Amino acid sequence: MKKLLLLIMLVSTGTLFAQTEKGKFVLSGGAGFQFTSINMDNTTQSTISLLPSFNAFVVNNFAIGLSSSFIFGGYKDDNGNRDNTSSVALIPNILYFFPVQGKVKPLVQAGIGFNAQNENDIPKYGTSSSTSYTGLIYNLGAGVACFIKDDISLNFGFSYTHVNLSNSNHDSKFSQGNIGVNLGFSIYL
């Protein structure tokens, strides 16, 4: 009877940790939508972002992988002028889950990669122009994975992302930092 009880305890505890053990994979995703009204020139701005990632656990609770970011945005003003921006980033990253019992696991992540951005300025009158930028992007984040099933989690967290972009044709550079509150999900394979 003791052996059966011990076996049941080991199996039930193992399912709580099986999601992040060596040899498993995690497919994650998030999406966002932002709508902003700016009082200067009655400008309206909107942004849609998609954030998929794929990681493989190389040891228990520690994964390496690739995150990506696809962001599409634009604004227009009352004068009929528009500006559209698209951005694509590929970010090799690391992901660590703290080895705690239960269905809520704290996690941290970090990555550095490549970012490309294109801006199209479309005035109501006159000639349109396009500018492309490339450069480095890095991010750091922390949060929790709340397991709603053994192989599915909802993820909540905070992150800091920074980009350094330049355009060799126009010799222009800029950097931008963002602090974000994140909501996403993960499927563990």
Image (tube, rainbow, N blue to C red):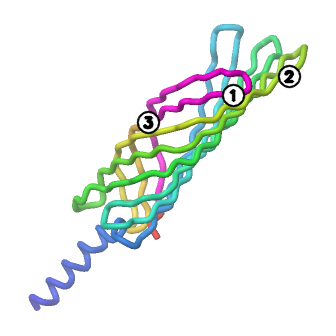
Q: Is residue 146 left or right of residue 67?
A: left
Majority secondary structure of magenta residues: strand
Q: Which residue is mark 2?
A: 128
Q: Position of residue 162 (x, y in %)?
A: 48, 32
Secondary structure of the residue carrying numbered label 3: strand
Label 1, label 2: how far apart the Cα atoms are: 20 Å
Q: Which residue is mark 1?
A: 168
Q: Is residue 120 above or below residue 92?
A: above
Q: Which residue is mark 3?
A: 181
Label 3, label 1: how far apart the Cα atoms are: 33 Å
Q: Is residue 171 above or below residue 7?
A: above
Q: Is residue 107 left or right of residue 167?
A: left
Question: Which callout, 3 or 2, points at the residue further toward the start of the chain?
Answer: 2
Asked if disc 3 and disc 2 are in contact, CB closer than 8 Å, the reply is no
Q: Is residue 89 above or below residue 125?
A: below
Q: Nearer the viewer, residue 119 or 19?
A: 119
Question: In this rendering, which labeled residue sits more in front, label 3 or label 1?
Answer: 1
Q: Nearer the viewer, residue 96 or 155?
A: 96
Question: Which callout, 1 or 2, points at the residue further toward the start of the chain?
Answer: 2
Quadrant of the rendering where the N terminus is positioned:
bottom left
| Mark 1: few/some/many CA within 10 Å (<14, 14-19, 20+) | few
Task: Identify residue type, mark 1.
Answer: Ser
| Mark 3: few/some/many CA within 10 Å (<14, 14-19, 20+) | few
Q: Residue at x 61, y 40 (%)?
A: 49
